[in-house]
Amino acid sequence: MSGTGDVHAPHGPETHGSETHGHATHGHEAHGHEAHDAGGGGAAPPAGGSFGLTRFHQLPLRSRLALLTAVAVAFAVALSAAACWLITRDRLTEQLDTSLGTVEVNSDYVQAISARCAGSPLNVRFQPTPYTIQLVSASGYVCTSPNKAPIPAQRVDQAVADGRLASAVHTTKDENGASMRVSTVPYRGPIADAQGNRVAISVAAPMDQVTDPLNQLALVLLVVAGVGVLGAATAGLWVARAGLKPVDRLTAAVEHVARTQDLTIRIPTDGEDEIARLSRSFNAMTAALAASRDLQQQLIADAGHELRTPLTSLRTNIDLLERSERSGRPIPAADKEALLASVKAQMGELAALIGDLQVLSRPSETGAGDGAASVRVVALHDIVGTALERARLRGPSLTITADLDPWYVRAEPAALERAVVNLLDNAVKFSPSGGTVEVRLAGGALTVRDHGPGIPPEELPHVFERFWRSPSARSLPGSGLGLSIVARTAEQAGGGVRLRNAPGGGTEALLTMPGAPTPPPDIPGAADGPADEPGAPGRPAAPGHRAAPGDGAEPGEQGTPPGA
């Protein structure tokens, strides 16, 4: 090194270096840049948070989606920007520390600074330099190069001077308030302070070369983040609008149905996503509701038509009796008795029709709820036996044979008995005098076969429809609901029923019920179970259940012709 006192230092920042040389600085950088960046308190939650959450839930769905997208993107951009800023700050600080660590100060320059501070300046010309060079004693005294603001000595600088630390790098402020990055190392030359103690050399540079790029970077990141958040909010709103178009169509359809009760509306469905599945479910629901409403209207219309006949007959007969009493011309006893018998018959037919309508109007009882409590394991063979006794009373001229194997099913006893009675009543009604009705129960299949004229093939598909009656049986009593009740009961119990023309003439009804030939082991005395149910064998009929002749389907119900 020459004795001109020049300070030799690289002019560009280096990419390597360390925060400290030797030992740690013991965290004495209270006024430094790191201390400023490390701190920071959390923001207090805004007042009225619950009110803001309520307002958020009141926003339309597309607005909420757009807002959530913008918040998510803003959070991600903020994290990325903060990470970028912190990494850049650390790298710039490392480069500045490396630059300070590579500055070499020759001994002549140090002696000139020391002599100048001692009041006997040497004839040395100090070359301009971007660095601040100063000597630091263990007592905290500093001697600074000319034209530079002194930098107060920190404890770490004093520790380096008295040999307790090998080096120190920290950030502090000079006497003018400028932030400075300071690198302090021991001086190995002969210079000492007034007490004879060794001194350290501090090389400092302004932190502007770190903070200015950081401020520019922060501004750029802020602009980019703002543009990104606005773009994300716009894209989120567009995506929400595009994605919720099927929901808008579904909403419009629901509002249209609620406003007009038009159940014929259908929503076009494409794809297999959740919206398409929801649209298909809505279409299925409206179709089911439309079918249910049509059936309800048909039932009301059919019931009104069927009720009109007995009511008209009742009114005519009662008018005749009333006119006779009012005119003083009594009706002959035989005619009056016939009129009263007709009134009684029409009342019985009306009561039977109302009872059948009540049965068909009840909801399904196979699900959970109060109806499920009456569904239990019952002996089908016992129910058929009791129904046979009643059928024999209604057809004394008929021969009714029975072959019943044990079979246990899970059903409502009263409804099951009513269905069996309806099948037997139809067979009894359409069997010729002196004919035979064959009843057989085997493997859960109940077969009831008569030897009547049978059913025309074109009428077989209609026999289970409500109020349908064969043209050849319209003059016979009945409501046309008996076989509908049978089909409903079988369906609720998981079984089925069908009618067919038997070989050799007549009609054969087949009722199938799932079950087992033995009762479940956890149902003690299941063979006697039906006796404990209302309407079961040997018990009084349940309310609304007719035990007198006419129980179940009246002869000719469902309009089945002879043999049905």
Image (cartoon, rainbow, N blue to C red):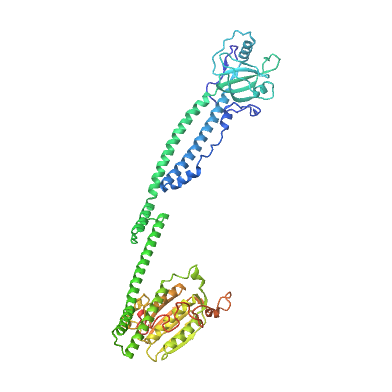
Compared to residue 460, the image places residue 56 above or below, namely above
Q: Nearer the viewer, residue 455 or 364?
A: 364
Q: Nearer the viewer, residue 61 or 137?
A: 61
Q: Residue at x 44, y 86 (%)?
A: 391
* Count of numbered badges drawn on the protein: 0
315 vs 87, left or right, is left
Assign the N terminus to one quadrant of the image: top right
Assign the C terminus to one quadrant of the image: bottom left
Compared to residue 10, the image places residue 331 above or below, namely below
Compared to residue 45, the image places residue 182 above or below, namely above
Q: Nearer the viewer, residue 94 or 347?
A: 347
Residue 424 in view: yes
Compared to residue 282, the image places residue 158 above or below, namely above
Residue 350 spot, x, y in % from top left: 37, 79
Residue 420 spot, x, y in % from top left: 45, 80
Residue 364 spot, x, y in % from top left: 45, 70
**What is the quadrant of residue 130 in the picture?**
top right
Residue 267 in view: no
Residue 346 spot, x, y in % from top left: 36, 82
**What is the quadrant of residue 24 in the picture?**
top right
**What is the quadrant of residue 94 in the picture?**
top right
232 vs 41, left or right, is left
